């Protein structure tokens, strides 16, 4: 396996880490973002997300479809908007974030982002291992045991490492073709799942409350696009600056929105007849049980492949995030270190933990708050036209333009911290009514009951930074000038 001279060639190891991509190495089209986010969202995890809308929110299928449409398209439009910074600055999202929070102040958001990535990878790896175990049982009659469970985890992790380790160009190529293959397989499986729907129950289900719709949109947004918003720039950084920003927004929204709406809506349909999918400790087995036996193998292959498409993207971003945190290793080695933690997490979920979905939902609820707070600050900064200095981004010493006050850009850091506190006030994270992991003092208010703590965090982060951060068109504390470049790009 050769090392790429240009850093971005299919089949070669990408040697570039977090350093900004020069204009001479930029290439590609906005359509790449369509395939990237389509591939990231064709996994079966969309089905239990949809099932919760019916089982826990009390929605009917039409409300669930509306929630899926608004939550997925809207949240990934935001991903596309934030990815414009990657096209403009040529670096990963959390590396660009140094310019906003300061070289030291950026450590908090970066650590939270890395934890989010590792958590998603663990959940995806666990689900994929369940799929592989079921495939071995169905095809060869091999029953699950501890050794086989570890082997299945390792198989998925090795597949992830091979793709993520090679890097950006290979990921972009695989995303496009794998989306077609696994997309078709998923459509076939979905057709048979639709045949199992209890249509009489579905069509006679009463509409749920408006608050359930609002809460559902928040839950879907937090569980889909919000979780990827701090990774969009990682995949847009090789794109030419001249590509209009609105194309990234449209490509991202439709790339993720199409599979998510289909999967979430189908999950809602299935749960209307049988709510057990929403609480299944093994969602792969729960869905498999709904299919004819001869469809099991195509379904399990589609499940494994779809989860791999999501996982290699998350692992690639996690490697870049680890380097941004200060890990001084080549990018491919950072990816390798990340998968070790992924393996440990998979062992916990499959061999120790009693519940799969409870920790999943709780994890999403809690991490959505600090990530949303970061989004609020970054969105305002982006709208004000941040101009990125490549040398200052990589200079983590006191000489950096982005050192600010002791390494902290106080308006951003304070805005982020205040937003987290505000969001957690309205947040409740629990696996059941009796197993409450965290409950803010305002969790029983309208915002809290409807699961909008993350939205409060985003709004507060944006408001604080808008009030105290550098104004557009005026000299910033970093010595630069903010201009409305990003707004102009978005309007092209």
Image (cartoon, helix red, strand yellow):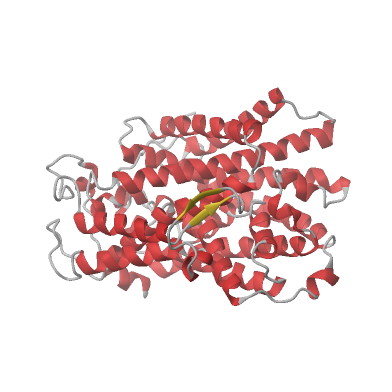
Q: Quadrant of residue 385?
A: bottom left
Up the image or down, 223 lies above or below 340; here it is: below
Q: Is residue 25 visible?
A: no
Q: Quadrant of residue 150?
A: top right
Residue occupying image coordinates x 20% and y 41%: 395
Residue drawn 75% across the image and 58% down it: 275
How far from the left and from the top, in percent, is residue 397?
16, 39
Q: Nearer the viewer, residue 463 or 124?
A: 463
Residue found 71% across the figure and 60% down from its top:
267
9, above or below 2, in the image: below
Horizontal side, residue 342 vs residue 461: left or right: right
Q: Position of residue 485 (x, y in %)?
A: 27, 68
Q: Disc count in the image?
A: 0
Looking at the picture, how far across and down is residue 424, in whole percent? 41, 57
Most extreme residue toward the top is 147
The one of 251 and 287 positioned closer to us in this rendering: 287
């Amino acid at each position: 396996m050769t090392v790429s001279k240009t850093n971005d060639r299919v089949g070669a190891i990408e040697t570039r880490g977090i350093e900004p991509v020069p204009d001479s190495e930029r290439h590609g089209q906005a359509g790449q973002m369509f395939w990237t986010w389509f591939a990231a969202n064709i996994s079966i995890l969309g089905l239990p997300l949809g099932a919760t809308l019916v089982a826990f929110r009390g929605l009917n299928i039409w409300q669930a479809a509306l929630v899926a449409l608004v939550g997925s398209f809207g949240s990934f439009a935001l991903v596309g908007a934030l990815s414009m910074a990657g096209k403009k600055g040529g670096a990963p999202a959390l590396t660009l974030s140094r310019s906003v929070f300061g070289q030291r102040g950026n450590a908090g958001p970066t650590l939270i982002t890395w934890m989010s990535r590792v958590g998603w990878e663990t959940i995806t790896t666990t689900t994929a291992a369940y799929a592989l175990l079921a495939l071995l049982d169905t095809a060869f009659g091999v029953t699950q045991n501890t050794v086989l469970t570890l082997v299945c985890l390792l198989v998925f992790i090795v597949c992830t490492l091979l793709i993520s380790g090679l890097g950006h160009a290979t990921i972009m190529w695989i995303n496009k073709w794998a989306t077609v293959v696994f997309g078709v397989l998923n459509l076939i499986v979905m057709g048979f799942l639709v045949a199992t729907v209890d249509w009489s129950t579905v069509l006679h289900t009463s509409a749920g409350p408006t608050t359930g719709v609002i809460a559902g949109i928040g839950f879907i947004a937090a569980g889909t696009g919000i979780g990827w918003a701090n990774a969009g720039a990682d995949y847009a950084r090789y794109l030419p600056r001249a590509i209009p920003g609105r194309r990234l927004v449209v490509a991202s929204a439709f790339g993720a929105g199409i599979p998510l709406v289909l999967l979430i809506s189908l999950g809602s349909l299935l749960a209307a007849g049988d709510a057990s999918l929403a609480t299944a400790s093994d969602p792969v087995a729960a869905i498999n049980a709904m299919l004819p036996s001869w469809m099991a193998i195509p379904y399990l292959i589609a499940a494994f492949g779809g989860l791999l498409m999501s996982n290699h993207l998350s692992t690639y971003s996690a490697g870049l995030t680890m380097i941004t945190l200060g890990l001084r290793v080549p990018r491919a080695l950072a990816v390798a270190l990340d998968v070790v933690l992924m393996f440990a997490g998979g062992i916990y979920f499959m061999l120790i933990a009693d519940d799969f979905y409870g920790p999943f939902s709780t994890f999403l609820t809690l991490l959505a708050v600090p990530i949303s707070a970061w989004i609020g600050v970054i969105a305002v900064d982006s709208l004000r036209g941040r101009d990125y200095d490549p040398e200052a981004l990589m200079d983590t010493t006191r000489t950096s333009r982005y050192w600010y006050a002791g390494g902290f850009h106080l308006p951003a850091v304070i805005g982020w911290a205040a937003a987290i506190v505000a969001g957690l006030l309205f947040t409740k994270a629990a696996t059941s009514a009796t197993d409450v992991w965290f409950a803010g003092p305002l969790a029983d208010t309208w915002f809290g009951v409807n699961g909008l703590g993350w939205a409060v965090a985003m709004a507060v982060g944006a408001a604080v930074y808008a009030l105290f951060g550098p104004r557009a068109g005026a000299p910033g504390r970093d010595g630069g000038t903010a201009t409305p470049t990003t707004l102009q790009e978005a309007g092209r």
